[in-house]
Amino acid sequence: MTQPETLQTLGRAADTPEPLVSVRRLRKRFALHPERLLPWRFDRRQRGWRRERIHAVNGVDLDIQRGDALCVVGESGCGKSTLARLIMGLVTPSDGEVHYDGWRIDHLNARQWQPFRRRMQMIFQNPYASLNPRLTVRQALEEPVRIHHPDWSRDRVEAKVEALMDDVGIDNGWGDRFAHEFSGGQRQRIAIARALSVDPEFVVADEPVSALDVSVQAQVLNLMMDAQASHRLTYLFITHDLAVVEHFATRVAVMYLGTICELADADTLFARPRHPYTRALLAASPRLDDAFPGQLRLSGELSMPLQAPSGCVFRDRCPHANRRCREAAPTPITLDRGHQVACHAVEEGRI
Amino acid sequence: MRANPMALLEVEHLDVRFPLRRGEIRAVRDLSFSLQRGERLGIVGESGAGKSVLAFSLLKLLSRPGRIVAGTVRFEGRELTSLSERQFRRLRGNRLAMIFQDPLTTLNPVLTIGQQMIESLKAHRRLSTRRARIVAIDKLRQVQVSSPERRLEQYPHQLSGGLCQRVVIAIALLLEPDIIIADEPTTALDVTIQAEIITLLKRLCDEHDVGLIVISHDLGVIGQLTQRTLVMYAGRIVEQGPTREIINDAQHPYTQGLINALPQMTLPRQRLHQIPGSMPTLSEVPSGCAFHPRCAYRITPEGLPRRDCIENVPEPVRSGECQVACHWVAELIARGPAEERAT
C-alpha cells in the first residue's frame, strides 16, 4: 500500500475536519473514436495532427466530509457519472489526484485497491443490469462477504446475509430466487444490500432512483437514508432530479461540462443559488405549484467538450456572459459557509 | 363521462386483453373518458398501470396477442375499433399522431430527417417533393429548430436528444392532426430541455386547436402541461378531474399516496411517505378495488375491514369537480350531508 500522504500541502484550512474523500484537479479525457486505426485528425488551421478527445471531467476540486450526502447534479453529458467512476477507480484519471481518508488512491493496481473496495461501494442506476442474472439473491449477497472475509465460517456468512436482507426489506424466503423474479424497486434494494454487505463507510450511488416509479423511489430513498443513519455512511449521490437532491442532499455540487460551477450546503443552494446555471436549472425543474418562476430560461443544449474550453464553460448559454467570460475561466470563489461559486459575474457583483 | 356529442375523442368501456397460454392479462378494464378539441389531457400512473397499452389501443397499434375485447373508441363520432387496418392507416399519422418516449428509436437511423418527413407527407398527401420540402421546413421552424434546411440533410444520430424530440414533434405536426398522443414525451430529456418541450407542446396545442393526450409517470410534467388528468391503477381509472384539483386536493387514496410520495411533499432529510407494497402485475389483479391490499382505508374507523373494498369494484362517484372510484370516498360523500344535518 502507498504511504499516507499529508493533505496539509494542499492548502486545507486548518479548522475544517479532514475530508473522507478529497479530489484535486481531477481530469479525464476520452478518445472520441477509439475504434479508429488513426485516432488523429489533420487540423488544417493549425497544420498539424490533432487527437480528438472528449474532456469529460475538467479540473474538479472536491472534498467530501464524513457523514455528508453530497449530491452531484447536472444535465446528461456534464461528466457527473465519470466523476463518480473516477473516485471509485473504475476509470483511471488522465490527471489529478483522488485521496481517500488520507491515502492517495488514483493510481493503485487491483491488488492495492482491495482494502479500499471494502470501504467504498457503488450502487448503479439500472438494477436490471447490475445484478448477475445467474446468481440467486443469496449467492449475490454472499459473494462479496466471502471475498472480503475469507476467514468467516459458513454460518457467519449466512447470518450476515440474513441480516442484510432484513435490513433492506427483502423477505428471507426469497433468497433462492433469481434477480429477474423481482421488480425494479426490489432489485435496487438487493443492489443496495450488496453494496452494504461489506460494511462500507462510503457509498457512491449513480442515479439509483432514476429508473423507478415515484412510490418505489420513496421506498428506496427512505432505505438509503435509514442505511446512512444506521451504518454511518457517507454518500456521493449522482442524479439529475432536483427534487430528489433537495430532499436527500446535505451538500450539493452543480456540474456543467466537466467542471463544478457551484458547491454549497443543500439549503443554501436551494434558497440562494448564485451561479446562473444553477438558477436556470432550478427554474426549469417542474414544480407542483403553478407555472414556471420563469425568470431565467436556457436555450441551446450542452455541447460536447471536444476541446478544453477557453473561458467559462457556460458562456454560450449564459445571459450574463461578457468578454472576460469568453477569455478567462473563472476560479471558484468562496462566499460564506463553504458556498463556492465559479462565475465572473458573481465575483464582480454583476448578478 | 356522459356521451358528449361535441367530444373529439370518446372512449367508452374500453377493455383490452392479452390472452396468454396461462391466463389472460387484462391491461385496460372498462375505461371511459373523452377529449375535447384543444384540450390537454394527462394520464398518470406507475409502470404497469396500462397507460401505454391504452395509448397503443387508441391508435390500433397493439401488438399480438393484445386486442380490444369490448368498448368503443369514437373519433368525431366515427367508430374506430371496427375499422380495417387499411381504413385506419388513412387516419393514423394524418388525423391522429403519436410521439413516443425515446426520440432516437422513433426515428429511422438510416434515413435523413428530410427523407423521413417528406416520406410521410407524400404518403398521405399528393405533394411534389419540392412542395413537401417547403412544408417540412415550415414545421421544423414551428418547433424552433435552428437552420431547418440543414437539418433536413442530417441523420438522427447527428442531432442531440432534445433536437431529435423536436423533429419527432414536427413530424407529428406535419399533417396537421386533430389529436396528438404523447407517451412520456420528456422522460428521456434533461430538465432544461424538458421545460422547453413542455412550453412548445402547450403553444402548439393552443395555436392549432389540437387535442393532446400526455402519458407520464411524472406528476410535475402532468401538472404543467395538462388541464385535466386521469389517474390509472391496474388498468382502471381511479380518479379523474381538473389537474389542479387532483394535485392540490387528491381524493383517491392511491392518488394521495402518489403525490405524498414525492420528495417535495416532505421536509428535506425526513422520511418520505411511501405506499406499502407494490403495483400488482396485470395478470393477478386483486379482487374488488385493485388498490385495497395497499390502502389504509380498507379498514373502517371502527377497525373492521371494509367488505366492499375486497368484494366489489368501486363505481366512479362525483366528488367536487372530480370523479373518484373509491368506496371510502363514496361513503364519506354519502355520510357528509347527513352529518351536516345532524349538527
Image (tube, coloured by chain):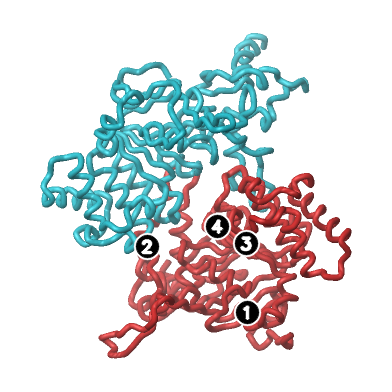
Chain colours: A red, B cyan
Q: Position of residue B38 (x, y in %)?
A: 31, 32
Q: Measure how far apart labels 4 and 1 are at the Cα level.
A: 28 Å
Q: Secondary structure at mark 4?
A: helix
Q: Secondary structure at mark 1?
A: strand
Residue marked by disc 2: A301
Q: Nearer the viewer, mark 2 or mark 3?
A: 3
The amino acid on which the numbered mark 3 sits, given as a three-letter code, is Ala
Q: Is disc 1 on the same chain as disc 3?
A: yes
- Tell me where residue B281 sits by quadrant: top right
The amino acid on which the numbered mark 2 sits, given as a three-letter code, is Glu
Vertical relation: A52 (above or below) B238? below
Residue marked by disc 3: A205
Looking at the rendered structure, which numbered label has been put on residue A98? Answer: 1
A126 and B148: which one is in front?
A126
The amino acid on which the numbered mark 4 sits, given as a three-letter code, is Phe
Q: Secondary structure at mark 3?
A: strand
Vertical relation: A228 (above or below) A64? above
Q: Measure how far apart labels 3 and 1 are at the Cα level.
A: 18 Å
On screen, residue A291 versus residue A41, left or right, reads right
Q: The residue marked by circle 3 belongs to what chain?
A: A
Give the mark nearest the N terminus, 4 or 3. Answer: 3
